[in-house]
Image (cartoon, rainbow, N blue to C red):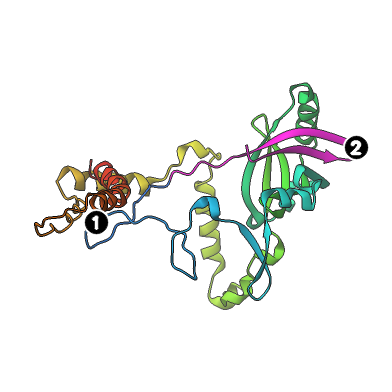
Amino acid sequence: MIWRGHVSFGLVSIPVGLYPAESANALDFTLLDTKDHSPIGYRKVNKSTGAEVPASRIARGFEYAKGRYVIVTDEDLRRASPERTQRIDILSFTDQSEIDPRYFERPYYLSPSVAKNDKGYVLLREALKKTGKVGVATVVIRARQHLAALFPCDGALVLNTIRYPSELRDATELGLPGQNAHDLGVTTKEVDMAERLISDMVEPWRPEKYRDEYQEELLGFVRRRAKEGDVEEAEPEAPPPRKAPGNVVDIMELLKQSLDRAPKAKPASRRAKRRSA
């Protein structure tokens, strides 16, 4: 759940929880150093010192003047406008067909967050279904206010964030062909043939019949490479140079060096074994 709040329209308030509706299926590649094929980690470093900064020390800052920041916590984001961060405000209702598909951005599911308020959730869902309308709403998600469309789908209420007009490029910047097809040499016969071809290819929309075929082929290609032995293993880290024998051995220094090396060697070794398996 991303957040818990209310859907509000008129005097109606429906408690809901907001959940992602997307599920990423991308292949998970590991970035490697071509020198020794060791995995490369993602490091957050201090730009002044170059030292890595632990997650516990990372804060969100707003630069209000050159080099001067106001630290903003998650609690600050909620306190700045508590009502907006806990409410989906339906501003109006419209036909979904009136919303240009380019504006749709990311879908979320809404679920009743209080069992006794299931009635309000179902009431809004059924009313939208029968009228064929979608709610045009605003919602604050992760410190940003979004425009959104609220509509029923498969028994759920879906909140799909919508891009603002300023976020879409003007297509005329691309130097597109003119609107007059005849002037561009497109004949009536060619248009008629294209229309017939489109008509012949019309079929009901069934999203389950489509899949990411490229990802399947890429995964098969990778597996064949692995089966043929075409794999790279991370080179073991070189052992520390041996010290010349002497009368005094600094055991504490050797222990310190061993402890400093251990956290770096073990995770890299485990990841390399998993990737080469």
Amino acid tagged 2: Leu
Residue 130 position, x and y percent, is 78, 33
Amino acid tagged 1: His
Q: Nearer the viewer, residue 29 or 21?
A: 29
Q: Which residue is mark 1?
A: 37
Main SS, magenta residues: strand
Residue 8 position, x and y percent, is 83, 40
Residue 137 showing in the rendered view: no
Look at the picture and state if 203 lies above or below 66. Answer: above
Report the residue at 73% width, 42% height from top.
150
In the picture, the quarter occupied by the N terminus is top right
Residue 234 position, x and y percent, is 21, 52
Mark 1 residue crowding within 10 angstroms, few (<14) / some (14–19) / many (20+): some
Left or right: residue 163 versus residue 263 is right
Picture quadrant of residue 63:
bottom right
Look at the picture and state if 85 lies above or below 118. Answer: below
Numbered disc in front, either 1 or 2: 1
Q: Are marks 1 and 2 in contact (CB under 8 Å)?
A: no
Q: Work out which residue is located at the far left of the displayed protein and give it.
A: 245
Q: Magenta segment: does it hold 47?
A: no
Residue 204 position, x and y percent, is 55, 39
Mark carried by residue 11: 2
Secondary structure at badge 2 equals loop
Picture quadrant of residue 126:
top right
Report the residue at 76% width, 42% height from top.
86
Secondary structure at badge 1 equals loop
Report the residue at 67% width, 46% height from top.
160
Q: Which residues are magenta?
A: 1-25
Q: Nearer the viewer, residue 67 or 196?
A: 67
Q: Work out which residue is located at the far front of the displayed protein and give it.
A: 247
